[in-house]
């Protein structure tokens, strides 16, 4: 794999330059940079409001991403701009690709720093092409053969409710969505829902054809949590009713040694980004995973997700490419 800057750093031509003016007419160039580098960080430009960010994102995207099936708590800011996550500041968030468990996912992610916080709060990013290169061939083959399964239990009072995740109060709407999105489901009681879906672990980039490790198999697996939280959740729910867990696509458990290797692959490729006020980092979501370090103080990072992409054709290309390699 050829060397390239990760992320590609683009600094303001003059201190306090206006980023929307700088990027006017440069969408195609930015997309080419994303397909090669996986991430572009714009730094040193004048701060923007949420409204101005939303307008800029609109000029750099083909469509906004409708975020049903949400797994992270967020607040709406304006337009297609949301808070990045509302998880507690002391929590570390493991690398992941946004919405990689869905039939349709956002191709571009726009992270904007309104305020970096007083300490910590870095956003590590990892090139998933290089993550894939670190994974043992036997593990890749097992995942390609079996795929991976995401099992989710929506339990009243725990995490995101099914009403929040699916943006509805109507069970029939949830059922219609699940059928359309190839998600199996079972109502446990009045307020509880179980869903499970099987997805491909590898996808091929639509521009370059490069194959990327694109899934939540590690992120949502119970073994990825720290020991105290893992034990607490198992005591509360048992393995069958955990809020989130992953398996091989046939429902068999992913071995601890495999999860350990996958974790090491992500962490070995992680590059921490220390935020500065006014930073805009654009990620190719198919190529680049992101994470979050714990922080202190007021940290405000906004997120906009755009350019929806259906995974089916990309998965078929990835299988063909890996078979030929």
Image: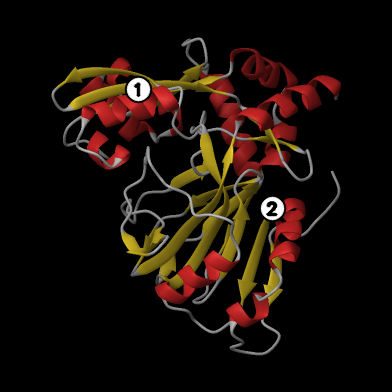
- Seen at 31% across and 53% down, the residue is 88
Residue found at the very far bottom of the displayed protein: 15
- Seen at 28% across and 42% down, the residue is 167
**Where residue 157 appears, x then y in whole percent?**
16, 36
Q: Is residue 21 above or below residue 149?
A: below
Any mark on residue 195, and which?
Answer: 1
Q: Do the numbered discs 1 and 2 sit on residues whose CB atoms are within 8 Å?
A: no
According to the picture, the residue beneath numbered tag 2 turns out to be 38
Please tell me in which quadrant of the rendered image residue 70 appears.
Answer: top left
Observer-nearest of 86 and 169: 169
Observer-nearest of 24 and 319: 24
Residue 79 is left or right of residue 255, and the answer is left
Please tell me in which quadrant of the rendered image residue 310 appears.
Answer: top right
Q: How far separated are the C-alphas under marks 1 and 2? A: 31 Å
Q: Is residue 255 above or below residue 270?
A: above
- Seen at 13% across and 24% down, the residue is 190
**Where residue 143 appears, x then y in whole percent?**
62, 19
**Mark 1 crowd level (few <14, some 14–19, many ≥20, 10 Å Cα):** some
């Amino acid at each position: 794999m050829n060397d390239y800057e990760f992320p590609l750093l683009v600094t303001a031509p003059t201190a306090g330059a206006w980023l929307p003016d700088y990027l006017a007419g440069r969408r195609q160039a930015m997309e080419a940079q994303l397909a090669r580098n996986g991430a572009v960080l714009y730094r040193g430009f004048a701060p923007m409001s949420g409204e101005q960010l939303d307008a800029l994102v609109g000029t750099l995207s083909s469509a906004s991403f409708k975020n049903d099936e949400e797994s992270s708590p967020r607040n709406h800011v304006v337009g297609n701009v949301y808070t990045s996550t509302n998880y507690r500041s002391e929590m570390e968030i493991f690398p992941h690709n946004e919405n990689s468990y869905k039939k349709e996912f956002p191709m571009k992610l726009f992270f904007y720093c309104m305020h970096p916080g007083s300490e910590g709060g870095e956003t590590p990013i990892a090139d998933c092409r290089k993550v894939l290169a670190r994974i043992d061939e036997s593990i890749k083959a097992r995942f390609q053969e079996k795929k991976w399964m995401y099992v989710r239990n929506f339990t009243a009072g725990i995490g995101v409710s099914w009403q929040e995740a699916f943006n509805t109060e109507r069970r029939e709407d949830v059922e219609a969505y699940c059928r359309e999105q190839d998600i199996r489901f079972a109502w446990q009681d009045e307020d509880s829902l179980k869903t499970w879906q099987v997805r491909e672990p590898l996808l091929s980039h639509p521009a370059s054809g490069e194959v990327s490790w694109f899934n939540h198999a590690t992120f949502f697996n119970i073994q990825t949590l720290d020991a105290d939280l893992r034990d607490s959740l198992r005591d509360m729910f048992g393995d069958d009713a955990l809020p989130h867990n992953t398996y091989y696509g046939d429902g068999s458990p992913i071995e601890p040694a495999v999860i350990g290797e996958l974790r090491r692959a992500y962490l070995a490729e992680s590059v921490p980004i220390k935020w500065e006020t006014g930073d805009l980092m654009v990620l190719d979501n198919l190529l680049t995973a992101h994470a979050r370090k714990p922080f202190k103080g007021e940290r405000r990072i906004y997120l906009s997700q755009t350019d929806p992409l259906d995974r089916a054709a990309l998965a078929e290309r990835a299988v063909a490419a890996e078979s030929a390699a």
